[in-house]
Image: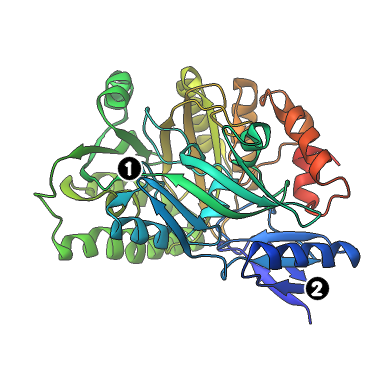
Amino acid sequence: MTSPWANWAGNQTATAARVAHPSSAAELGEVLRAAAADGLRVKAVGSGHSFTPTALTDGVRVELDRMASLLGVDGNLVTIGAGMPLSVVNATLAAHGLAMPNLGDIDAQTISGALSTGTHGTGAGFGCLSTFIEALTLVTADGTELACSATQNPELFAAARVNIGALGVLSTVTLRCAPAFVLRADERPAPLADVWSGLDEHIGANDHFEFYWFPYTDRVQIKRNNRVPAADSPLPGWRRWLDDDFLSNTVFGAACRLGRAFPATVPPVSRISARALSARTYTAASHEVFCTPRRVRFVEMEYGLPRAALREAFDGLRSVVAGLPYKIQFPVEVRFTAADDIWLSHGQGRDNAYIAIHQYVGAPFEEYFRRFEAVTEPLGGRPHWGKMHFRTAESLARVYPHHADFVALRDKLDPNRLFANAYTERVLGA
């Protein structure tokens, strides 16, 4: 029986010949060996929050929902099954007095999908989520489970922490967590000029800093999150519902539908939205501050850039938006991360600034995305592996110093391309 699948945004679909739900690494190994014997390719899927075709297959789709348990807690080291959703990871850690040191703003992804694509939050002192991995196990094409860490199979560890599904299937991951902590969130509208004039201070003086630019305006919303001793200023329930549920989802969704039907309404609505925002400050558990509900569906492209190239890339983006034959309904998100040593991490070897662009589902986007990509490529831009892009292996090898090393390890672990699909062939080479 064939089985259709679609990602969260609905822009990627595939129909697999069969679907497997292994409950252990041993069962997963059997699934992989059987697929290879039948001449079928294999892809593991998470919650479908990637916008690229990275999880598509017409062979065997592996779902890890039965490999999603808490496997052990040893101080601040927590071992979990690779299929656990981030929302469950956060709740599980909180129950043990722990927390992820940093998070992005969505918690619907599985931990394996988030790690494999280089998912990140913001904060000059933090790399992507994969930098919190202490150890992992990977089931490879021949059904063997390989363990790796900084001291055990270190070359595999350097590659597998961000692996885009090309080396095998993650089975377990051990995370180096932090004691549970509280954040004070300070969110407020500001002129874009104020962000640029004080950017270094914004980044350096806050644990976590980001901003959202509203197209067709000179206004932004800035977000600053900093650790504090206690949750002494909780956000009232009605205010959280009003801001994060009703305004950010219900009202914004209605505005997007209006803009898709009547594009001329987009610039004035953007200007009204930028001016209507009110400041708020509150304290809460870290994961409650980092993560917010996202029900308005969109497609997304995100590029990591050397931090010194941010202003040039951002100004280029503004020119792109102004010159498009259609309107952009979503704000643009700008975040910051620290350098790391993971081969295919966007932050490999450098501090990064990220620019994420979005478009409402059903609205035109390709020219927007292609023009922005053309701005970022000569600046050393690296595309987020889970977000849409049009790059190929040849161009990616120029910005990832370990691209060839990763490909060589892929060739060694998966010589018959059990885990390949059109996406991995495009970004790694066939």
Side of 244 relative to 360 (left or right): left
- Image height of 159 relative to 6, above or below: above
- Image height of 354 relative to 266, above or below: above
Give neighbour class at mark 1: few <14, some 14-19, many 20+ (Cα, 10 Å).
some
Residue type of the residue flagged with mark 1: Ala
What is the CA distance from the residue labelled 1 to the residue labelled 2? 42 Å
- Image height of 166 relative to 338, above or below: below
Query: Can you see residue 19?
Result: yes
Mark 2 residue element: loop
The number of callouts visible is: 2
Q: Nearer the viewer, residue 23 or 40?
A: 23
Q: Give me the disc on residue 17.
A: 2
Q: Residue at x 28, y 50 (%)?
A: 289
Of mark 1 and mark 2, the one earlier in the sequence is: 2
- Image height of 255 relative to 307, above or below: below
Q: Residue at x 12, y 46 (%)?
A: 230
Tags 1 and 2 in contact by the CB under 8 Å rule? no
Q: Position of residue 426 (x, y in %)?
A: 79, 42
Frontmost of labels 1 and 2 is 1
Q: Position of residue 103 (x, y in %)?
A: 39, 46
Quadrant containing the N terminus in the rendered view: bottom right
Q: Give me the disc on residue 97.
A: none
Query: Can you see residue 217?
Result: no
Residue tagged 1: 178
